Image (cartoon, grey):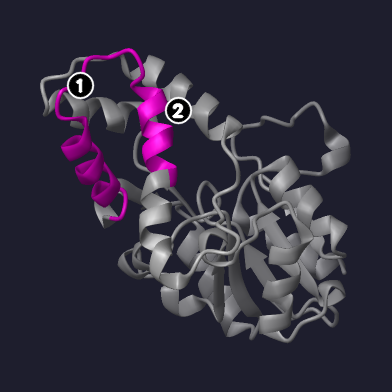
């Protein structure tokens, strides 16, 4: 992998780009709920989670103090989980939620995609500046530490601590400013059409849409990539 004359920095989304939950969210919720005697359908929970997540406001808290952020992050996720289990009798919900929240910070909840470490290693050796820009909460840092990818990144920017979120320009521009890079010499890779591809392009970054499951196979104009190995092709083409 050779360093491009133009691209000097490469930024990534986090969830479903570098790593993923080891099972569907609905399945993980279902398994933990069963420990509390609540038997529910995993597929139903998964669909309700996707619906709740899509409808929720961005995971950012304009005007909040640093001290307030842990509580605000938990409250944001509590509303999601409450919606997922709405209409289901759950006497120990508060205890369940606290355990669930902690569960999603643990290493064994997440799996790196098979190529993630190899690609990051090659990019780092080629002396690219590497970063993460994610609509995530503060659990992102320990997750990256436990998955042993934290040291590859020069900066990690996540929405809950930035008062702004993708696809807005502010979080991209803030990341570029901290990295010392111009948008024109930076690339962003993520799996979400609006948040990642369109958001990064809007500030002038080169952007690649990651489509591991062929979701956009009928939209060739998006020129999606199927895994992170394909980044190399775009760097060499520039």
Location of residue 70 (image quadrant) = bottom left
Q: Taking 168 as reference, is 20 left or right?
A: left
State the image coordinates of residue 144 (x, y, percent, origin top left): 40, 66
Dot 1, crowdedness within 10 Å: few (<14), some or many (≥20)? some
Main secondary-structure element of the magenta-colored stretch = helix
Q: Earlier in the sequence, mark 1 or mark 2?
A: 2
Q: From where the camera sits, is residue 234 visible?
A: yes
Q: Residue at x 77, y 53 (%)?
A: 199
> In the image, which is nearer the foreground, mark 1 or mark 2?
1
- The quadrant in which the C terminus is found is bottom right
Relative to the observer, which residue lies in front, 43 or 151? Answer: 43
Q: From where the camera sits, is residue 24 visible?
A: no
Relative to the observer, which residue lies in front, 131 or 114? Answer: 131
State the image coordinates of residue 134 (x, y, percent, origin top left): 57, 58
State the mark number for residue 90: 1
State the image coordinates of residue 4 (x, y, percent, origin top left): 79, 78
Residue 77, magenta (yes or no):
yes
Q: Looking at the picture, does residue 171 appear above or below residue 114? A: below
Residue 16, magenta (yes or no):
no
Q: Taking 141 as reference, is 178 left or right?
A: right
């Amino acid at each position: 992998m050779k360093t491009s004359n133009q691209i000097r920095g490469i930024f990534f989304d986090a969830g479903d780009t570098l790593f993923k939950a080891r099972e569907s969210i609905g399945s993980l919720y279902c398994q933990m709920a069963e420990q509390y005697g609540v038997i529910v359908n995993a597929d139903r929970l998964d669909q309700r989670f996707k619906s709740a997540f899509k409808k929720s406001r961005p995971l950012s808290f304009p005007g909040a103090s640093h001290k307030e952020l842990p509580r605000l992050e938990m409250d944001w996720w509590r509303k999601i989980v409450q919606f997922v289990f709405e209409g289901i009798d759950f006497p120990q919900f508060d205890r369940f939620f606290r355990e669930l929240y902690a569960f999603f910070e643990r290493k064994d909840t997440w799996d790196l995609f098979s190529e993630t470490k190899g690609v990051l290693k090659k990019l780092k050796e080629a002396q690219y500046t590497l970063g993460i820009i994610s609509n995530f909460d503060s659990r992102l840092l320990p997750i990256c530490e436990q998955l042993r990818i934290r040291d590859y990144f020069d900066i990690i920017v996540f929405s809950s601590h930035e008062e702004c979120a993708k696809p807005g320009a502010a979080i991209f521009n803030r990341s570029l400013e901290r990295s010392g890079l111009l948008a024109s010499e930076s690339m962003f890779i993520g799996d979400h059409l609006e948040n990642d591809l369109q958001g990064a392009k809007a500030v002038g970054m080169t952007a690649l849409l990651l489509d591991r499951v062929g979701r956009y196979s009928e939209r060739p104009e998006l020129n999606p990539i199927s895994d992170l190995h394909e980044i190399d092709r775009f760097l060499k083409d520039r």
